[in-house]
Amino acid sequence: MNAASYTPRPGLREGDRAGSGPAPPAALAVAPGVDHFPGFLDRAAQEALRDEVMAILAEAPPFRPRMPRTGKPFSVCMSNCGALGWVSDEAGYRYQPTHPETGRAWPAMPPVLLAAFAAIAPGAPPPEACLINLYDSGARMGLHQDRDEEELAAPVVSLSLGDTALFRVGGLERNAPTRSFRLASGDAMSLGGAGRLAFHGVDRVIAGSSTLLAHGGRINLTLRRVTRAPR
Ligand code: SIN
Ligand code: FE2
């Protein structure tokens, strides 16, 4: 990413801001509607969020999703927080209010995640689901679209913790050209507008690139609005 691709978010200029709200975060525009926010969370905020995620995982233990139809296991493990959680098994991809193994409701979404979403997507209806993806050093995520949501007007916002990921994003067709960039611990990313349905995935995780997680690996938190917001 070079300096020429830096585009301030609308409203970034100090003089444009009304009131005392926090400054909108700075974004790198990767592609139309695909924004990267390097260093969105500082180290202290990453540590606090990591601890919140560990508490969530104690309540809603990681499960290994399986591909629809074939039942092939994913290389990542997952959990969720929020009113709805994304799950996948032989019956298909879906959102549901309960953990697929424990049957319990997902833990509540921590306020810090709601605040992060609001900072990156001001005015969007609040997220209902936070998917927690857990990557060990061999895990990856094939190119896919996030399209199991009824509400496509809200962006998908993700936060990365731990080891750096090589993230790949393309266009609206699977075979469109792609580009890749690194998502480091504390970075945020959003897919909205023209980029809401962009194909994306994680080619690999760079082992040992962060000291945030005691056992290494990467945690990605994906915040999504699922149901259609009242118009
Ligand atoms: C996903 O698209 O579900 C995960 C993206 C990521 O891990 O950064
Ligand atoms: Fe995704």
Image (cartoon, helix red, strand yellow):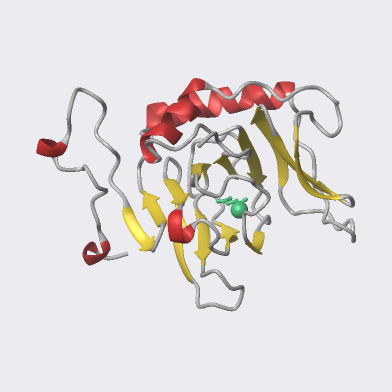
> At which x and y percent is residue 200?
56, 62
Residue 130, by quadrant, is top right
Is residue 207 left or right of 95 when viewed as pictured? left
Q: Is residue 5 above or below residue 16?
A: below
Q: Quadrant of the N terminus?
A: bottom left
What residue is rendered at 56% in x and 23% in y? 52
Residue 223, by quadrant, is top right
Q: Is residue 211 above or below residue 91?
A: above
What residue is rendered at 74% in x and 54% in y? 75
Instruction: Return the residue nearer the eye: 40 or 149.
Output: 149
Q: Is residue 152 above or below residue 16?
A: below
Is residue 141 left or right of 191 when viewed as pictured? right
Is residue 187 left or right of 149 when viewed as pictured? left
Is residue 89 left or right of 141 when viewed as pictured? right
Instruction: Return the residue nearer the eye: 119 or 26.
Output: 119
> At which x and y percent is residue 146?
62, 54
> At which x and y percent is residue 72?
86, 58
Q: How many marks?
A: 0
What residue is rendered at 44% in x and 49% in y? 189
> At which x and y percent is residue 211?
49, 39
